[in-house]
Structures are given as structure tokens and as C-alpha cells.
Amino acid sequence: MKSFDELLAESVAAHGHLCPGQVVGVRLALLGLRLLGFEAPPTLPQLKKLIVFVEMDRCTGDAVAHTSGVKLGRRSLKFVDYGIMAATFVNLATDQAFRVISTEESRDLADLYAPAEPDHYRRQLLAYKVMPDSVMFRVQEVKVDLSEYDLPGPTRRKAVCGKCGQVVRDNREVKQNGAVYCRPCAWGAYFTLAREIAWPEMNWAPGPAVNPGRPIDLDLHEAMPRVG
Ligand SMILES: [Zn+2]
Ligand SMILES: [Zn+2]
């Protein structure tokens, strides 16, 4: 178990700067993990049982993810774009889940907890270190329904979009009128006006060609060291 200051220092290093969001995020994660009975940061086997839903893409989100040890690449970090300063900590082994919400009152009360500090920003930093959990957070016990397609592990399903041909992993395809589509084709996307383009130096690759003049050896990928 690391100390709060160690966890904060590590989160700051990963995030790139010290900010009030780092202090709030580390504390939010500490509380969520403690409610599940997990270490901070969790190590194996706890780490494999943990899923964290982060509801904002702000400084706090980085600190929550870092302190919890969850990653998009492991499918243990889920981003839901609610714009809410909250995160939910799920124990896959027990289905226990706690949603920890950062209170707006804590922002208003920061001045009271560090009155001697003249600078507003530093006042927030200091206040969030001494403010009790009960002032900083509300907690909801919640039920999170995760399907087998949301869990860590290998891809369990692939589908092919009937409109654009894109492969869609993990049951994220949409069925409409008997056909299967990717979500952008079915629902529209965050982008519009997509058109395929050529770009400068299209044939660039980071490594030299292997066996130039011969067809590409399909086993090449197996021979490469596995990353991640
Ligand atoms: Zn920040
Ligand atoms: Zn499509």
C-alpha cells in the first residue's frame, strides 16, 4: 500500500503537472478502492477483478485511472462521456460496485479549508488534501451490468459492417432491418464527410524491408516480439 503522497507524485508524473484534479482524482480512487477492499494501487490478483468507469475526460480522470491501475488497453478502464466528476469501481468477482461522485460543495468550501493561502489555485490544492472524504464525495452503491463482451480477454466476437466493410469487435455492431452495421454507419459519428485520401510518403515504415523482392512472409508477425 503506497502513501497518498507517493500516489499523488506518481499520478502527477504520469499526468504531466500538479493540479487540483490530481489531488481530487487520487483521493476519489483511494476511496473507491477502499470501499471494494482493494489496495492502492491494486496488484494481482485484485487488479484482474477491477473495472473502473470514468465519467469525465479531465485532469481528475487521469488521476483516477492511474491510481486504480486501470487501462483502456486492458479493458479495465471504461470512459463514459457524461461530463460528471464521478467514477465507478466494480469488483468483477463479487459484482460489488461503488460510484464515487465529487461534490460541487467541495469547490465552494476550498477557501475555508486553506484560508491562509492567498492564491486560489494553491488554496484548492491544499484544501483537497485536508478536506474529509464526506465533504469531497458522495457515494452510491450501484449495480453495473457487464456483458461478456465488456470484459478483459481476447476478442469474443467480430462482425463486418454491411455498408462500409469495417470489422467491428466485441458485439458493438448494430442490427437494422436484418443487416449488420458499424455504429458510425448506423447512427452517424463524431465525424462527417469521410473520404479516403492518399498522403505524402505513403510507403514509409519504421523498419527496413525484410527479404526485399520476395513476397511478404505471413509468419513475420509471429516472429516479431509481442508488445503489450
Ligand atoms: Zn491537470
Ligand atoms: Zn460501417
Image (cartoon, helix red, strand yellow):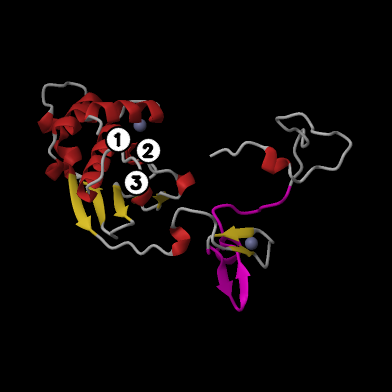
- Most foreground residue, 81 or 119: 81
**Residue 63 percent across, percent down from the top left:** 33, 36
Whether residue 52 is visible here, answered yes or no, is no
Residue at the extreme bottom: 177
Question: Measured from the top left, where is residue 103 in percent x and y?
Answer: 20, 46
Earlier-in-chain disc, 1 versus 3:
1
Q: Amino acid at mark 2?
A: Asp
Indicate which disc residue 45 carries.
3
Residue mark closest to the camera, 1 vs 2:
2
Residues at circles 1 and 2 in contact by the CB criterion of under 8 Å: yes
Residue 179 within the magenta-colored segment of the rendering:
yes
Q: Looking at the picture, which amino acid does disc 3 mark?
A: Pro
Q: Residue at x 74, y 44 (%)?
A: 219
Gap in angstroms between the C-alphas marked 3 and 2: 23 Å
* Residue located at (18% from left, 27% from top): 126
Q: CA distance from mark 1 to mark 2?
A: 9 Å
* Mark 1 CB near ligand 1 (8 Å cut): yes
Say which of 113 and 29 sits in front: 29
Q: Say whether mark 2 is within 8 Å of ligand 1.
A: yes
Q: Residue at x 23, y 30 (%)?
A: 4
In the rendered structure, find residue 62 and report the number of the disc placed on it: 2
Res. 189 in view = yes
Q: Which residue is mark 1?
A: 21
**Amino acid type for the residue under numbered disc 1:** Gly
**In the picture, which quadrant includes the N terminus?**
top left
Magenta part of the protein: which range? 171-196
